[in-house]
Amino acid sequence: MKKNILVVGSGGREHALGWKLSKSQSVSKVYYCPGNGGTINNLSFSINDFSKIKSFALKNNCIVVVGPEEPLTKGIVNELSDSISIFGPTKEAAQLESSKSFAKNFMRQNNIPTAEHNIFSEPEKAKDFVYNTNKSLVIKADGLAGGKGVVVCDHKEDALNAIDSIMIRKDFGNSGNMIVIEERLFGKEVSIIVLTDGYTIIPMATAQDHKRIYENDKGPNTGGMGSFSPSKIISNDIFNDVINKIVKKTIHSMKKNANPFVGFLYAGLMIEKHTGKPYVLEYNVRMGDPECQSIIMRMNSDLYDYIKCSISGTLDTLPPISWSEKPAVCVVMAEKGYPSNHAKGNVIYGLNSHFGPNVKIFHASTIRNNNKILTAGGRVLGVTALGSDFNKARSDAYDSVRKIHWGADNHYYRKDIGLDT
């Protein structure tokens, strides 16, 4: 019997997951809560209205797939799993993302490689630490901050300003009640994401994203300005090292602590430039965005089968996922001014252009109004292309980007996505 899917979320990641799930022979219909201007079968209620999500899923024979971190950290799996098949970790397991201090303590206790760090709840003590160290630093808000609560510091002044922003001005609200100050690592950032039922681990394809707003990785961090898959800097040795010494240890330690982890586990890593060793920068308890868009374009297997078996604890019955040999590149188009002040409500033109069979426009922050698609602020679209090689994938992605515009000069995108391979 075919099942319906209810994807919780409204971003590019959710559009990509729903698009892939809709291709399964086992799926009848995909709903989105709340979805965006590029998705259909959208529901009008909030991602945090668990009672309405539960009622709709029961009535419509839905498996619930949770995209973003917020409902996971608020306990949507705890609320629904007694009567609904739902994909994602519990509130307790989601602390790996919702609390940087929890994650750091967890890594320290389980000998998982990460940067040296200290945790502070008082801004003056944090500043004293900064004054008295000669190390390069990274300042992190303890709680969720939409991918923007991490400040990579070039100077002491940067660190002191970050402490003021996070802990005193409360730019990220209560997420800044505590901060983590860690030693800055230098090297290449990569992402390894796995699917797990709490016991068995099945890796997704490797990927890299571009966090900074400007070319050559300059400027403030964003939620991600583009991605590509596969990563070319993850050798087989590094990959096996990460799976065995980081990912498996994480999953097994969570299970040992009576916190079994089900869902997508994302390890954001730094491959340290002098030693070549991987260190965990952060955990996410869901697919990355925009890494998801690049990864999903390369997936040959039926995603539904893997999600179903993750929920039922039977991932060990499935083979490894089959991936296209072709690389994928995703270029994020954002409102000009992002991640600071930016407009919204601009009509998007060019979405009906001919993009070719290997290009997909994943909507992120869009709305549909009177048959027009409007921007809804921030990261608007993820233009994603699959190519015979990286040059072809980049070329097709950027050719497609240039067909899309809004306002006189209101859109922005980086022009170097996929070059850092």
Image (cartoon, rainbow, N blue to C red):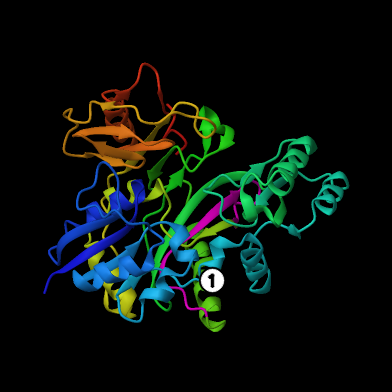
Answer whether residue 184 is visible to the viewer in this image. no
- Amino acid residing under circle 1: Thr
Q: Position of residue 110 (x, y in %)?
A: 63, 73
Asked where in the image residue 253 lies, by quadrant, the reply is bottom right
Which of 418 and 140 lies nearest the eye of the viewer?
140
Residue topped by disc 1: 250
**Residue 260 part of the magenta-drawn span:** yes
Query: Front-most of 28 and 171?
Result: 171
In terms of image quadrants, where is residue 212?
top right
The image position of residue 179, as x and y in percent, is 70, 55
Q: Is residue 197 left or right of residue 28?
A: right
How crowded pointer 1 is (Cα within 10 Å; few <14, some 14-19, many 20+) is rated as many
Residue drawn at x 70%, y 42% is: 165
Taking the magenta stretch, the answer to whether it contains residue 368 is no
Q: Residue at x 23, y 61 (%)?
A: 301
Where's the N terminus, which quadrant?
Answer: bottom left
Q: Residue 373 is drawn in which quadrant?
A: top left
**Residue located at (31% from left, 71% from top):** 54
289 in relation to 398, above or below = below
Looking at the image, how many numbered discs can be counted on the residues? Answer: 1
Q: Which residues are magenta?
A: 259-279
Camera-side residue: 17 or 195? 17
Residue at point 20%, 53% (across, down):
41
Q: In what element is the residue under mark 1? A: helix
Q: Position of residue 178 (x, y in %)?
A: 70, 57
The C terminus, quarter of image: top left
| Residue 368 located left or right of residue 357 | right
Q: Taking 104 as reference, is 153 above or below it?
A: above
